Amino acid sequence: MNDFINNGIIEVATLTPKSVQIGNPAYNVDRMLELINDVNKKNSNGERQTRIVVFPELCITGYTCGDLFNHSTLINSAINELFRFVEKSNNEFNPIMFVGMPLRKDNQLFNCAIPIHKGKILGIIPKTYIPNYSVFYESRNFKPSFDRINDEMTIRGVTYPFTTNLLIEDEVSGAVIGTEVCEDLWGPIPVSSYHCLHGANIIVNLSASNETIGKSDYRRDLVRMHSARCMCGYIYASATSDESTTDNAFSGHCIIAENGYVISESIFFSNTEITYGEIDIEKCINDRTMNSSYMIIQEKKEYKCINTKTFEPVSHKFKSNKELSVLPFVPHNIDSRSEEIMNIQITGLAQRLKKIHCSNAVIGISGGLDSTLALIVTVEAFKLNNYDMKGIIGITMPGFGTTSRTLENSKKLMEALNVTILEIPIRDACIQHYNDIQHNIDIHDITYENGQARERTQILMDMANKYNGIVVGTGDLSELALGWCTYNGDQMSMYGVNASIPKTLVRSIVKSYAKKQADDIKDTLLDICDTPISPELLPPNPDGTIAQKTEDAIGSYAVHDFVLYYMLRYGFGPKKIYELYVNSLELQAVRKGVNLDIIDKQSILRDMRTFYKRFFAQQFKRSCMPDGIKVGSVSLSPRGDWRMPSDASAEIWLKELDTVEI
């Protein structure tokens, strides 16, 4: 499906009644109806657009009925209440619902999940793995799915599919839902692994998982990592504390995960009845199609697919309750993650130096963020290799736009780190060059700017020859994406340590590193973090401050990095990226009590247009970019992660931006 309603994001929920009576289906269904009516009410008035809801395992009877499951009174009552629930829950905005109950078939009892939609039972899915260890004795009462005689079950004159291999396809949202029941996830090869290989992009799990020390962490990791391995959304609904009896305690631990991340979960023993979450189906589909090893099916199975159509959204205008980080490259736990990120950079550079038997590195130090991070990484790589710090030749090359602030910071930093310090002014060399190429020095155009960048690169390369070293590149991922670098100037080096680090992350890493340093280094690093981003190629203001500010020219790096992340990581289009960004800004503003009018949507669109124009036009610079270690999930290296023709057109991306409604 190409045209995803609501940008392919669907809201889902686990519904776990806090009040349950073991062996009383009528009481339990009453509680279930209260919850589904609450969901339907919120759907109908536009508060929510819930498309899938999942109840716990055996929710109609209760999970801990024991040998009561062998009594026809309980089974017959459960069937009666199932049909009452089907009838009473039907609503114009009714989502696809999954409930759990015991059912008899061919002289056997099965633990089943029942998908229901708009007054109809869609099928019956029996549990496959029946636990019979520790405190679980399910095989005393239930049979596994593979013991069934056939793939159909008739109830009250209507025949339904009776198979684990049943997929529910929602043609409106693009969701393809596979089902498993509790232990089906905990087995060596989870049932849902096959579901996903045969098309499911969302897995629901009706569960009754008891609590022991540490089990909640294991359960969370199990759900999270399985959603990552299967590149799917996962909805896990577990029995609440009212199921606790005799030897077992239940907590109602519900988890909603998406492709390796926990989107939302309930608090243990809190009796939270409804846990909402949002799953991005398009993200899962894009990840799967990009992963060439995903669809290697060694054992193909026969599947039955039921097509359904959930309610039309109240509004086709994008609405989401999920607040994404507006800085997706910056981890929330940046202090711990920054060390991990730097270790990857450090290891890459240290190994390159070691393997080419090189103990000297030349690096241009501008007093800006990128060169600061590159210098820090180089210093740490030299420590790792037990190299002499004086083998790092830091060169500051003041030009026409260099300010005293950046020049002094670059010197202070190099002095504090005990590297070799060289200052080589480029003004005279550039004036000579402008004369040679007959360029008027008073015309501050692209020739004026790039001439300085290439002069600096020439110095670095020649100094690397002189010292038998390599030039460590300082350019970052955001600059590569925008082509905000001079071809055969600062675009070029012998190893780019920042090639996988976007601009919004560079500042966070430097700040985190600064916290662990002595005051002299710390103060310099923090001042560098507060310095406006600039190439300093144009003359400064009369008061000596930076006149040329990069974001004034090309727009916000926050916007650019957001687009870069969701374009490359998940293959999202411009309209969806815009709506995700604005939606998250609005949710953030509401949470902070800030007026929504501060969100400049026109500027966001302008910056996005700049991104797409430059991203496509500047690919030729990335096609010949130097080696550089990959750090995160997004990289623009032409040798692995991003292969794109240099002459591709941005037209359809820009046209899609034109359809955005403000």
Image: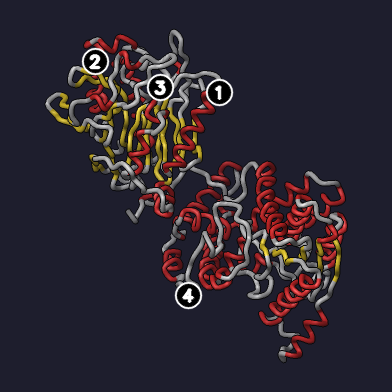
Q: Secondary structure at mark 2?
A: helix
Q: Secondary structure at mark 1?
A: loop
- The residue under the point 77% across, 75% down is 462
- The residue under the point 75% across, 86% down is 433
Q: Which mark is residue 647?
A: 4
Residue on which the image places disc 1 = 214
Query: Mark 1 is on which residue type?
Result: Gly
Q: Earlier in the sequence, mark 3 or mark 1?
A: 3
Label 1: how many residues lie within 10 Å, few (<14), some (14-19) or many (20+)?
A: few
Q: Earlier in the sequence, mark 2 or mark 4?
A: 2
Q: Earlier in the sequence, mark 1 or mark 4?
A: 1
- The residue under the point 83% across, 56% down is 389
Disc 2 from disc 4: Cα separation: 67 Å
Disc 3 from disc 1: Cα separation: 16 Å
Q: Is residue 552 visible?
A: yes
Give the mark count.
4
Residue on which the image places disc 3 = 208
Q: Are marks 2 and 1 in contact (CB under 8 Å)?
A: no
- The residue under the point 73% across, 47% down is 512
Q: Earlier in the sequence, mark 3 or mark 4?
A: 3
Query: Mark 3 is on which residue type?
Result: Ala
Q: Secondary structure at mark 3?
A: loop
* On screen, residue 265 above or below 373: above
Residue on which the image places disc 2 = 75
Q: Are marks 3 and 4 in contact (CB under 8 Å)?
A: no
Q: Earlier in the sequence, mark 3 or mark 2?
A: 2
Label 4: how many residues lie within 10 Å, few (<14), some (14-19) or many (20+)?
A: few
**With 420 as the anchor, is 98 left or right in this view?**
left
